[in-house]
């Protein structure tokens, strides 16, 4: 499948993100663009001969490149306004319909013109918390991670994919190949909203059992530990699960010696229910 390159320039920082499909590239363009627009707040700049108001300053530029000489992007200005364009050397502004966001206008222009045939697939589930985005893996992403690859996927912390990443992605692949509909009860990447970096995984061991129980497992890259991300992710996914009519109980467990993981469950409000020679078991509610 063709690869798309999204280059995000914000001040001295430059991020380059490779994505496997145009739809996914446009989703990332929207996500990073909306973050930049929300953070925009430039002051006017006075030079000797000219004053540059915030609306005249480009604080972030997102450039998308793809096959067939595809070139497009958005500019975020200092006042938070955004405009989309196509082309590179001869840029053409994309007209926005009433109430249409710039990234939606770019999407409207690019998707009908794309030569890529994108197979129909269910949209991945997304769950947001204060600092995190939990995004469910689709089958294509799971296949890459199961093979230990992260090329073409989102930027990730050092040490990712984890050993548990490969195991959970392999489970998604097996069930996907068997035609099992995971709905929202699959594996999720934990993405830090601040910088869009994947810092770990969280997810379900499977769909709800006949009694309405689900089991959640999680893991973070070493550099992301100790900041409360695991607790925040566990709370977000548990709350989502308990909102589903078929779920009555959320379960989790940790090795007996893994006090750090046990503290995560306790801080997430889970109660201790049982212990064996190897594990401690927790439950919510």
Image (cartoon, grey):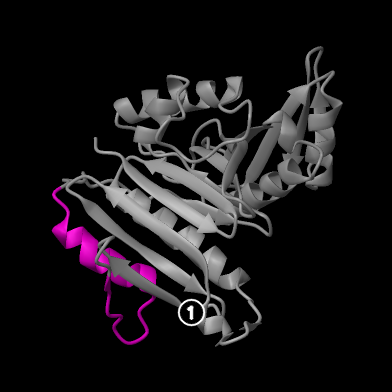
Q: Which residues are drawn in magenta?
A: 92-115
Residue receiving disc 1? 81
Q: Tell me if 133 is positioned left or right of 150 in this view.
A: right
What x and y, as percent, mark residue 203? Answer: 57, 37
Give the quarter of the image for residue 74.
bottom left
Q: Secondary structure at mark 1?
A: loop
Left or right? Give the position of 212 relative to 107: right
> Is residue 260 found inside the magenta-colored segment of the image?
no
Whether residue 101 is in magenta: the answer is yes
Q: Nearer the viewer, residue 252 or 171?
A: 171
Kindly tell me whether residue 271 is visible in this rendering: no
Please give the name of the residue rendered at 30% of the width and 60% of the height, measured from the top-left corner: 72
| Quadrant in which the N terminus appears | top left
Q: Residue at x 67, y 46 (%)?
A: 233
Residue displayed at 44% across by 44% down: 17
Rendered residue at 34%/54% (across/down) = 64
Q: How many marks?
A: 1
Q: Position of residue 43 (x, y in %)?
A: 66, 81
Provide residue 264's location: percent of width, then percent of height: 79, 38
Measuring from the top left, give residue 197's x and y in whole percent. 58, 44
**Residue 173 in sight from this viewpoint:** yes
Is 8 displayed left or right of 232 in the figure? left
Image quadrant where residue 140 sits: top left
């Amino acid at each position: 499948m063709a690869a798309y390159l999204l280059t995000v320039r914000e001040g001295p920082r430059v991020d380059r993100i490779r994505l496997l499909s145009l739809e996914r590239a446009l989703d990332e363009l929207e996500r990073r663009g909306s973050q930049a627009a929300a953070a925009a707040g430039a002051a006017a700049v006075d030079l000797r001969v000219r004053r540059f108001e915030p609306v005249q300053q480009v604080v972030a530029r997102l450039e998308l490149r793809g096959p067939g000489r595809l070139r497009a992007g958005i500019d975020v200005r200092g006042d938070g306004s955004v405009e989309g364009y196509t082309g590179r050397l001869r840029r053409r502004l994309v007209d926005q319909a009433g109430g249409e966001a710039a990234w939606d206008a770019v999407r409207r222009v690019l998707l009908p013109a794309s030569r890529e045939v994108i197979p129909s697939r269910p949209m991945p589930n997304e769950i947001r918390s204060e600092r995190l985005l939990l995004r469910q893996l689709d089958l294509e992403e799971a296949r890459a991670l199961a093979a230990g690859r992260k090329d073409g996927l989102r930027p990730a912390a050092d040490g990712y994919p984890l050993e548990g990443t490969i195991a959970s992605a392999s489970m998604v692949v097996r069930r996907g190949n068997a035609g099992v509909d995971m709905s929202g009860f699959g594996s999720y990447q934990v993405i830090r909203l601040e910088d869009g970096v994947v810092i770990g995984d969280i997810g379900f061991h499977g769909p709800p059992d006949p009694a309405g129980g689900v089991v959640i497992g999680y893991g973070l890259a070493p550099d992301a530990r100790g900041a409360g991300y695991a607790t925040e992710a566990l709370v977000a996914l548990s709350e989502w699960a308990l909102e589903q009519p078929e779920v009555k109980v959320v379960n989790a467990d940790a090795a007996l010696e893994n006090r750090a993981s046990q503290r995560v469950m306790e801080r997430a409000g889970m109660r201790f229910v049982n212990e064996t020679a190897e594990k401690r078991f927790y439950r919510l509610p």
